[in-house]
Amino acid sequence: QVQLEESGGGLVQAGGSLRLSCSASGLSFSMFVLGWFRQAPGKERELVAVVSRTGNSTYYTDSVKGRFTISRDNAKKKVYLQMNRLIPEDTAVYYCAAKIAFSDTYISTTGNEYAHWGRGTQVTVSS
């Protein structure tokens, strides 16, 4: 059974930082591209960041570039999202997701391609 579990969400003031973690089990972790998505109330789910299976290629949506950093530790089967200089617009439920990849640099930016999802962690940024 494949399982992804997020942690690290919470309430933080604007300008603060949080680090989200996602622990994986039941899969060959290093064979998967990993992504972070978020969904705010009344809005569609949005891709935030993606990291390739080796960690050497990344993608960020424009609104988080320079503030968020995605990374992974294949030995620990974990993926992280370091979020700095948070703003109220970052408030959302954040999900990690995994998709099988067949090259070290492959990145998917479409949520429907990800087969495995965590149940999410709430991030709330107050002004």
Image (tube, helix red, strand yellow):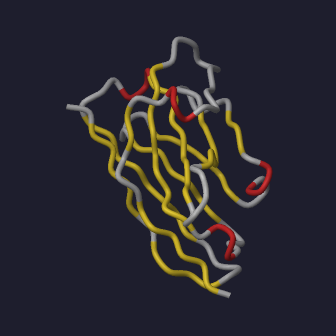
Of residues 86 and 113, the one drawn nearer to the viewer in this rendering: 113
Q: With 67 as the anchor, is 122 left or right in this view?
A: left
Where, quadrant-wise, is the N terminus in this rendering? top left
Quadrant where the C terminus is found in the figure: bottom right
Which residue: 43% across, 25% down?
A: 30
User: Furthest residue to the top?
Assistant: 102
**Residue situated furthest left in the rendering:** 1
Residue found 59% across the figure and 70% down from its top:
91
Is 89 on the left or on the right of 120, as rendered? right
Which x, y percent locates residue 109?
64, 32
Residue at figure coordinates x 47%, y 45% from the top left: 79
The front one of 119 and 8 is: 119
Q: Please tell me whether residue 20 is drawn above or below residue 126 in the rendered image.
A: above
Identify which residue is drawn at 71% across, 79% down. Answer: 15
The one of 87 and 26 positioned closer to us in this rendering: 87
Q: Position of residue 3 (x, y in %)?
A: 27, 40
Q: Nearer the viewer, residue 78 or 41?
A: 41
Q: Note whether 31 is above or below 98 in the view shown.
A: above
**Percent of width and height locating residue 59:** 70, 38
The answer to whether 94 appears left or right of 120 in the picture is: right
Q: Is residue 46 placed above or below 59 in the rendered structure? A: below
Residue 18, position as x, y percentages in the image: 55, 69
Q: Is residue 105 left or right of residue 116?
A: right
Say which quarter of the image contains residue 90: bottom right
